[in-house]
Image (cartoon, rainbow, N blue to C red):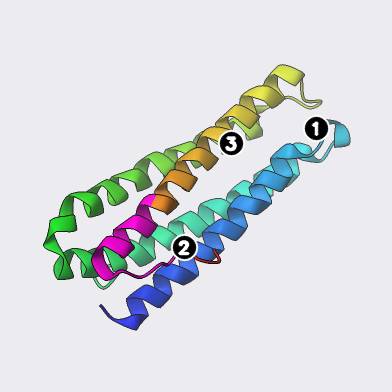
Amino acid sequence: MTDQALDAAKSRRKAMYEAMLSVERAVQAPTGTGTWGATLLTELADLSEALEHHIETVEAGDGIIAKAVKDAPRLDGHGTRLRDDHTALRRAVATATELTTQAPVPLTDNDAETIRDAVLDLMNGLTRHRYQGSNFVWEAYAVDIGRGA
């Protein structure tokens, strides 16, 4: 594996984590501020962008998934599952964004709960994907890309 593929994966991982933290801060804020939905939409857009950069980087022909599978063919199934996760994660971001966009102003408690549940589902999916990615890289190279991000 090249250091470039590993460095790119680490960079995307850190950006994703920071975007996740921003979404978490936005979704846990009080909904009565009048800006809750707009703030959450901004953070979801940033998270979506971070996810897209992650996908482009790790799925590229010279990305970490292709490199790891080439170097450790036994990980092909794991690499495929990581790629497949990307579709579900994109869908989860779109669902949370759509629910937030369509929510009435002022926001009802039921709408806030529905949005927060969608964001929680998204965050759970992202967290699972991140630890599966860390395990994937560890299995291929015995390198911990998760430390610090």
Task: Looking at the image, tell me whether mark 2 or mark 3 is earlier in sequence order.
Answer: 3
Q: Which amino acid, mark 1?
A: Thr
In this view, which residue lies farthest toward the front? 142
Say which of 134 and 97 sits in front.
134
Residues packed near mark 1 inside 10 Å, few (<14), some (14 to 19) or many (20 plus): some
Q: Is the C-beta separation of discs 1 and 2 under 8 Å?
A: no
Q: Residue 121, image x and y in percent?
A: 52, 33
Task: Name the side, left or right, on which 142 lies relative to 125.
Answer: left
Image disc number at residue 146: 2
Image quarter in which the C terminus is found: bottom right
The region drawn magenta spans 132-145
Image disc number at residue 1: none
Prevailing secondary structure class for the magenta stretch in the rendered image: helix
The residue drawn where x is 53% and y is 65% is 14
Q: What separation in Å lies between label 2 and label 3 (alpha carbons)?
A: 22 Å
In this figure, which residue is indicated by the disc labeled 3?
119
Q: Which amino acid, mark 3?
A: Val
Q: Residue 89, image x and y in percent?
A: 43, 43
In this view, which residue lies farthest toward the bottom? 3
Secondary element type, mark 2: loop
Q: Residue 27, image x and y in percent?
A: 70, 39
The residue drawn where x is 60% and y is 56% is 19
Q: Residue 73, image x and y in percent?
A: 12, 61
Q: Is residue 138 magenta?
A: yes
Say which of 98 and 32 sits in front.
32
Q: Nearer the viewer, mark 1 or mark 2?
A: 2
Image disc number at residue 31: 1
